[in-house]
Image (cartoon, coloured by chain):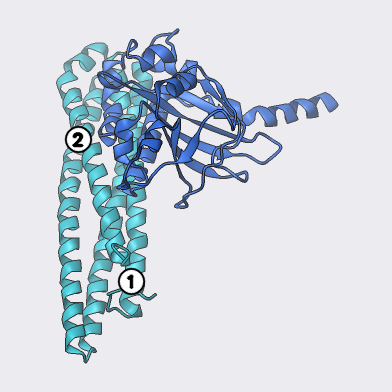
């Protein structure tokens, strides 16, 4: 009986992470377009800064009760290449705090990655400690962009049911959702690096739904 | 609710609040329709690739049924927004008739004219996108009927021109809907009296 209880508790603790990893890119792309579209419509995101960014992360992060699992999110990562924006890489984040103070909340987050080094760190699925990256709430739409904004690691935009939250960066882990990427690109061993460098191209049959995100990024 | 430069009393402002809420609901429904349309595009793309065709055809039918249902809700919601616009203008006009100050009357009448013009522009866009959405739905329903009568790798191949036409129209629809939601958002802020305040 004790073993059963332990197993049940272990399953509960593991639930957030495993549930998040089941999302396919076919579902994540419309979700990401919705997040980006809202931030653009509400003039939250600064499109001049988007032009300067080397990469972008669009995720929905859910906070779980403290003591159970911190927070977890899933979404997409894209990089800017000479040919324009790359295809999407499915990612998950776990642990720490990403704009979340208390459990049970939904946060839509867009991060502009301002240098290639940070894009590579996301692609490698690194752990981001609170002191390892300079993250600041990005300037709102229409605001003037200065050199500081262009050189910091992240410009972060957070939407929580209409409330704009401050950036609250604790340690969090990034994981590459290899299964979702393999299914989407129809290549079992496709890597995040290949996708972000346009070595692995978006299949013809997947291009139409993705075009909305490219349009929104213009 | 005190508003800078607005000469409205509580009747028209209460209706304005309802109208803004209704526009929020309309925006939400449009977001749901866009997601469903994206899923349909994925299903059509996978069908074209002969990828798990039976499963994708089933998903296509389900997603199309959902889209039709959401579109019906959108039509009802648009009617509600129009109805509230009419009520708001009527209440506002009635309020003007009770004003004794000539300058205040003129200023308010100008505001009413601006509100009417703004909504007319939005309504024109709503009708245009609605018309295109009708055409797209008919196209998708035709595809569904065609595949229901003959579903095989050959029939999927034969239907490619129609599939590609649907995908192109769906892509345009997503773009047009994003532009429309942008207009709804701007118009909603004006209705609430927050634009530029």
What kind of element bears circle 1?
helix
**In the rendered view, would you say B56 is above or below B97?**
above
Tell me which corner region of the image, top left, top right, bottom left or bottom right, holds residue A198.
top left
Mark with earlier residue (1, 2) = 1
Tell me if residue B80 can be seen: no
Find residue B55 and name its label: none
Q: Residue at x 31, y 47 (%)?
A: A41
Cα separation between marks 1 and 2? 34 Å
Q: As drawn, which residue projects farthest toward the front?
A: A147
The subunit letter for the residue under badge 2 reads B
Q: Residue at x 16, y 42 (%)?
A: B132
Rendered location of residue A162, percent (x, y): 44, 52
Rendered location of residue B26, percent (x, y): 32, 53
Q: Dot 1, how many residues are within 10 Å of its Cα: few (below 14), some (14-19), or many (20+)? A: many
Left/right placement of residue A15 relative to residue A133 reads: right
Rendered location of residue A117, percent (x, y): 44, 20
What kind of element bears circle 2?
helix
Find residue B172 and name its label: 2
Left/right placement of residue A199 relative to residue A170 reads: left
Pick the front one: B70 or A55: A55
Find residue B15 and name its label: 1
Tell me which corner region of the image, top left, top right, bottom left or bottom right, holds residue A50.
top left
Q: Residue at x 35, y 14 (%)?
A: A197
Q: Colour of chain B?
A: cyan
Left/right placement of residue B68 relative to residue B136 reads: right
């Amino acid at each position: 009986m004790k073993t059963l209880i332990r197993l049940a508790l272990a399953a509960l603790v593991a639930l957030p992470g495993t549930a998040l990893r089941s999302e396919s890119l076919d579902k994540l792309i419309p979700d990401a377009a919705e997040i980006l579209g809202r931030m653009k419509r509400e003039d939250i995101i600064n499109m001049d800064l988007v032009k300067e960014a080397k990469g972008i992360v669009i995720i929905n992060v859910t906070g779980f009760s403290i003591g159970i699992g911190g927070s977890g999110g899933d979404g997409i990562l894209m990089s800017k290449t000479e040919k324009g924006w790359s295809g999407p890489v499915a990612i998950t984040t776990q642990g720490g705090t990403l704009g979340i103070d208390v459990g049970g909340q939904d946060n839509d987050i867009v991060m502009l990655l301002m240098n290639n080094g940070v894009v590579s760190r996301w692609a490698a699925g690194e752990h981001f400690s609170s002191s390892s990256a300079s993250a600041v709430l990005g300037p709102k739409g229409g605001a003037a962009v200065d050199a500081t904004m262009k050189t910091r690691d992240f410009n972060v935009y957070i939407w929580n049911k209409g409330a704009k939250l401050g950036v609250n960066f604790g340690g969090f882990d990034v994981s590459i959702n290899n299964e979702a990427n393999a299914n989407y690109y129809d290549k079992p061993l496709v890597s995040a690096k290949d996708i972000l460098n346009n070595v692995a191209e978006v299949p013809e049959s997947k291009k139409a739904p993705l075009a909305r995100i490219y349009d929104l990024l213009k | 609710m005190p508003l800078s430069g607005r000469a409205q009393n509580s009747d028209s402002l209460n209706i304005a609040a309802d109208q803004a809420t209704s526009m929020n609901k309309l925006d939400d429904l449009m977001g749901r329709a866009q997601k469903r349309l994206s899923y349909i595009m994925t299903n059509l793309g996978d069908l074209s690739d002969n990828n798990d065709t039976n499963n994708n055809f089933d998903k296509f039918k389900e997603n199309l049924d959902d889209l039709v249902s959401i579109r019906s809700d959108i039509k009802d919601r648009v009617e509600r927004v129009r109805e509230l616009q009419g009520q708001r203008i009527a209440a506002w006009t009635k309020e003007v008739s009770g004003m004794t100050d000539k300058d205040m009357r003129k200023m308010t009448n100008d505001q009413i004219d601006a509100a009417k013009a703004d909504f007319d522009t939005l309504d024109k866009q709503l009708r245009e996108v609605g018309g295109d959405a009708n055409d797209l739905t008919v196209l998708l329903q035709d595809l569904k009927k065609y595949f229901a009568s003959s579903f095989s790798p050959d029939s999927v191949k034969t239907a490619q021109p129609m599939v590609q036409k649907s995908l192109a129209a769906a892509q345009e629809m997503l773009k047009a809907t994003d532009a429309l939601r942008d207009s709804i958002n701007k118009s909603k802020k004006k209705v609430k009296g927050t634009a530029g305040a």
